[in-house]
Image (spheres, helix red, strand yellow):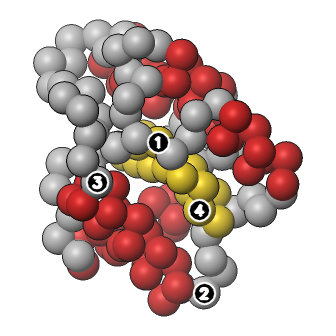
Amino acid sequence: MLVEDNKTDAELTLRALNKNKIANNIFWVKDGAEALEFIFATGAYAGRTSGLPKLILLDLKLPKVDGIEVLTRVKNDPLTKSIPVVMVTSSAEERDIVESYKLGVNSYLVKPVDFNQFVNVVAQAGLYWAVLNRTAR
């Protein structure tokens, strides 16, 4: 699952994952409120029958509900707390990094400005979390 309000960053992320053949079944939402509805199958996604996301790529600065609140809700719910959450954000501020790890983020990545570096970082993160990392079922 990709939670990203910036269309360009979302398209670059999806392109990087596609390029490395790890983008199948990636669901993109554009704000934190939609992310929570999708994850917890409420609101517009109340009828959703697919399982929980296997990975959440989460931006920090989101409209409606910010990434910190999404992370808090995911990590405080027994049903979802084991889902790996990777913060992918432009914020390199120490307080954001510290707060994210206190709340249980699994990884914190700062988006590189350079296009090729951005694609490389996203591809490596996607490969690790979606393919190499093993989670409890």
Q: CA distance from mark 2 to mark 4?
A: 14 Å
- What is the three-letter code of the residue carrying label 4? Leu
Which mark lies nearer to you, 3 or 4? 3
Disc 2: which residue = 114
* Residue 133 circle label: 3
Residue 103 relative to residue 88: left or right: right
Label 1 residue SS = strand
Q: Position of residue 18 (x, y in %)?
A: 24, 70
**Mark 3 and mark 4 residues within 8 Å of each other at the beta carbon:** no
Disc 4: which residue = 109
Question: Is any part of residue 133 visible from this angle?
Answer: yes
Residue 56 relative to residue 24: left or right: right
Of residue 52 and residue 99, the one placed in the foreground of this image is: 99
Residue at (28% x, 54% y) in the render: 133
- What is the three-letter code of the residue carrying label 2? Asp
How many residues crowd around disc 2 within 10 Å: few (fewer than 14), some, or many (20 or more)?
Answer: few
